[in-house]
Image (spheres, coloured by chain):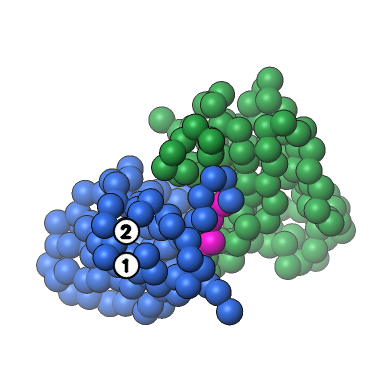
Amino acid sequence: DGGITQSPKYLFRKEGQNVTLSCEQNLNHDAMYWYRQDPGQGLRLIYYSQIVNDFQKGDIAEGYSVSREKKESFPLTVTSAQKNPTAFYLCASARGQGNGYTFGSGTRLTVV
Amino acid sequence: DQQVKQNSPSLSVQEGRISILNCDYTNSMFDYFLWYKKYPAEGPTFLISISSIKDKNEDGRFTVFLNKSAKHLSLHIVPSQPGDSAVYFCAASNPFENRDDKIIFGKGTRLHILP
């Protein structure tokens, strides 16, 4: 079955450590996105990529980095520069041209 | 500056009654609108969409209405069921002019269906 997989579902890290969240899709979608959800804030766009080896900053990119070396994969690194990293992170992919997104099941990151 | 606004953070509706979730937008270039449903600790799932050339789209118990002149859309759920309790996100995009195909989400409305 085609889908988008985020791993792990729960992640704990110590303050000051970088951490990488995985996102893999087998939908053959060109575009991939990372969102962050905080209570009362809705979904805020961190980074997105329309094509392999290219990505763009979203609204809240500071403290995050991404790579898009393969069409199927779009990992997100939460760096120590991110002031409030504890959140629920969602990855999505899209075929493009207004077809909407398919979301992964999310990763809950807790930094202690 | 919020381009997609859901002004009601939460809504409680009796089971069997109609749930109406509202959404306003400010960007007149948006021409495609979507509703997503989200359960806790899960990713959002697509519910229903509407193109700006229509004013209504229906799918089973779910109907979305679009009023372009008022820049307003609403999602109607009839009849409401316990499984409808979730957070609903309104979203908008301009897929044919917006080359990066970004979707702009509202902050969500938490719907509680009361027994």
Q: Is residue A94 left or right of residue A68?
A: right
x, y (%) of residue B78? 84, 53
Q: Secondary structure at mark 1?
A: loop
The chain assigned the colour blue in the figure is: A
Q: Is residue A72 visible?
A: yes
Contact flag, marks 1 and 2 (Cβ < 8 Å): yes
The residue wearing badge 1 is A70
**Do the residues at discs 1 and 2 belong to one chain?**
yes
Q: Residue furthest top?
A: B69
Q: Is residue B39 left or right of residue A23?
A: right
Q: Which mark is residue B88?
A: none
Residue A52 badge: 2
Mark 2 closeness class: few <14, some 14–19, many ≥20 residues within 10 Å: some
Range of the magenta residues? A100-105
Looking at the image, residue B103 lies above or below residue A92: above
Chain B colour?
A: green
Measured as percent of width and height from the top left, residue B101 is found at 47, 43
Q: Which residue is depicted at the point 54% across and 61% down?
A: A102
Disc 2 marks a residue whose amino acid type is Val
Residue A103 is covered by the magenta coloring: yes
From the top left corner, tell me how far across and down residue A24 is, in percent: 40, 72
Kind of residue indicated by mark 1: Lys
Residue shown at 31% from the left, 71% from the top = A21
Q: Nearer the viewer, residue B21 or B11?
A: B21
Q: Is residue B7 magenta?
A: no
Q: Chain of mark 1?
A: A
Tell me the distance, in whole angstroms, between the alpha carbons under discs 1 and 2.
Answer: 6 Å
Of the 4 image quadrants, the one containing the C terminus of chain A is bottom left
Q: Residue at x 27, y 65 (%)?
A: A69
